[in-house]
Image (tube, rainbow, N blue to C red):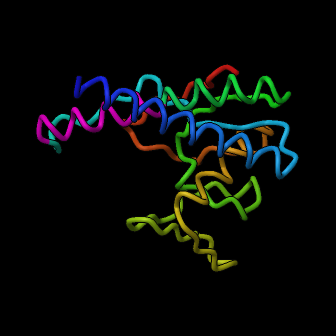
Amino acid sequence: HLWEKVRHLDENATRQVARQIVDFALTHDSKVIVFEYLRKYQAPKERMSRSGRKNHKRAYWLRGQIVQWVRDLAFREGILTVERNPAYTSQMCPQCPPDYRTVGMRVKHTFTCSNPHHAYSADADFVGMMNLYRKWNGTFTYPSQKRKDEPNPMQATA
């Protein structure tokens, strides 16, 4: 009976969040909602306790439920939903021209551009959101030098 209540609370919260996202898109006359492609994401095992990993896993499961509800609601309203690979989105400056492809500096939640020609600093989540948009419209450029352990990012399909 307790787990039934928890499940009901989860479902109710996901529906409310999805409705808020679609309402926001409608208010701003958006035609597309872009999500990060995180289907193959796994919680880091070495940094978390078992309960922490379970909470992390549950949060990403809820995120998936929200994405499904947003897809359904947005489709009914004529809004397209797509997913894009989030690689480098919070590390590249959205204000720099495409030929400047140097990774910026991120400290906790703040991104600072490394371009000496302008001083740009913003919330890393905001920078990530702007760059997800750039990935959607095809203007995002990857850094000229990737980390050695970084795999080639795959493009998620709509």
Residue 54 spot, x, y in % from top left: 22, 32
Residue reaching furthest to the left: 49
Looking at the rendering, which quadrant does residue 78 occupy?
Answer: top right
Q: What type of secondary structure mainly makes up the magenta span?
A: helix
Near-viewer residue (11 or 139): 11
The stretch drawn in magenta includes residue 99: no
The stretch drawn in magenta includes residue 61: yes
Residue reaching furthest to the front: 1
Looking at the rendering, which quadrant does residue 125 occupy?
Answer: bottom right
Near-viewer residue (24 or 109): 24
Q: Is residue 18 left or right of residue 49?
A: right
Q: Is residue 138 left or right of residue 37?
A: right
Residue drawn at point x = 72 percent, y = 37 percent:
33
Looking at the image, residue 50 lies above or below residue 110:
above
Looking at the image, residue 102 lies above or below residue 114:
above
Give the extent of the magenta segment.
49-63
